[in-house]
Amino acid sequence: MSHSPADLLITGCTVLVHDDQERIAFAPDAAIVVRDGRIESVGGAAEVAATGPAALEHIDARGQVALPGLVNCHTHAPMVALRGLAEDLPTEEWFNDVVWPVESNLTEKDVELGARLACAEMIRAGVTCFADHYFSMDTVAEVVAECGIRAHLGEAYFSSQGPQGREKSLEFALRHRGTADGRITTALAPHAPYTVTDADLAATARLALEHGLPVHLHAAENRDQTDTSLARHGLTPIEVLDRAGLLATDLLIAHGTGIIDRDLPVLERASGRTAVATAPRGYLKFAWPDTTPIRALRALGIPVGLATDGAASNNSLDVWESMALTSLIQKSTEGDPRWLTARQALHHATLQSARAVGLGDSIGSIAPGRRADIILVDLTGPHTRPVHDLAATLVHSARSADVRTTIVDGRVLMRDRELLTLDVPAVVRELEDRLPALVDRSHGRRIQEYDT
């Protein structure tokens, strides 16, 4: 251990740790030493006090739990600007009558303000990394670089944009990977098999392998899409991806509530690293009949990360809520109160979510050598006392508003609920001035048609 002062010392907290079998455990009265953006050590507070380093910054975290920062594995951050705009609608009307007409109005400034507001919401809710799939992503990358969060970014494209959509997605991914001091990773981002042709999917798979890039897309989002795909092509959406070569890439599939039994052997044979992101609140709102088949996917070793989708469908970027809902819905769907325990839900929220976005080696646990993406959760409120089972308290009693401090790469982005890198009132003022032009649908245009 170096004798020069550490950058950050957190003392007195209980730390969520993973044992060598990846089981969740809790280390009480611990100290975390952070140096150069990484966790240097996790030890007993008394032992660190006796032997340990002075630090440039010290956080006394008594009464708090240190967790790995949460990861939002699939969202469309700038869509917070459309929060609550398209309510109580079936999927096709939601897309065709509201969202895609409004998105035809989007300017880079709207995307920038939406991204700022989204990053503020996520930092306040203990999300330290998000996987974003949207347009004008250069602008989102600038916001990420400035506000200090971590992100996995992909420039979305439809085949209706012609070859330049795919080319722009590739060019963005190559230009931005490893930027923002390594906090930005990138992916190719075809929208979905129902909006991207087989030829474009196959070209994307070739480009991904050639350039060592992952792919992030929507597929088998719901059972209707699977049924429509079977009727049109004789293949499920997962089989369409396989035929295009995408299961040989590192692939992040959003939603997957339409994954059916015949897809499981296809996914099991995948030669790439496949992951699925689940965003259960949106499925409830759209009244989709199924949820992500987490139990079946986990049996195949496929990580399922937690997500919110965009705030236009979910109204929230609160991964804390996704964690609780995932646990509850899995119990209900499987008819088994023993499945998706609080500890399993915390595993999905931490290591599995990190793996889903390709960062399983650097984030997702609090351990020496990992990037210092840490949140401190205050459990002194009446709604979290007493604590009989700390995992259950975190998943089913705590709320995102209990996150006191959010740290990314060792930098404190929120201290005692105060955001340090974003000015929310200024963003909200500017965004609200722009809303009338943004939400206008009288022009009748839309960027795409939903017919699945």
Image (cartoon, helix red, strand yellow):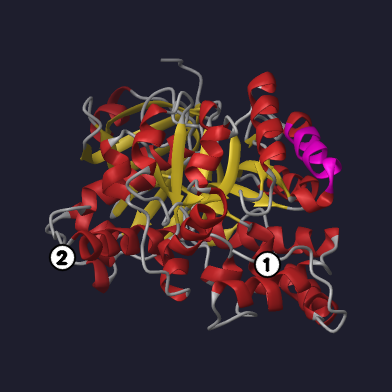
What kind of element bears circle 1?
helix
> What is the magenta range?
162-173
Judging depth in this view, the residue of 451 and 150 nearest the camera is: 451
- Left or right, 358 with respect to 101, comes to left
- Left or right, 246 with respect to 1, comes to right
The x and y percentages for residue 143 are 73, 50
The x and y percentages for residue 272 are 49, 26
The x and y percentages for residue 314 are 52, 69
Q: Is residue 100 above or below residue 254?
A: below
Q: How many marks?
A: 2
The x and y percentages for residue 329 are 29, 64
The image quadrant where one finds the C terminus is: bottom right
Judging depth in this view, the residue of 356 and 451 nearest the camera is: 451
Name the dominant secondary structure of the magenta segment. Answer: helix
Q: Earlier in the sequence, mark 2 or mark 1?
A: 2
Q: Residue at x 86, y 42 (%)?
A: 164
The image quadrant where one finds the N terminus is: top left
Asked whether residue 165 is drawn in magenta, I would say yes
What residue is disc 2 on?
A: 386
Judging depth in this view, the residue of 310 and 226 nearest the camera is: 226
What kind of element bears circle 2?
loop
Q: Residues within 10 Å of mark 2 (few under 14, many from 20)?
A: few
Q: Residue 424 shows which numbered tag?
A: 1
Q: Residues within 10 Å of mark 1 (few under 14, many from 20)?
A: some
- Amino acid under label 1? Val
- Left or right, 105 with respect to 399, comes to right
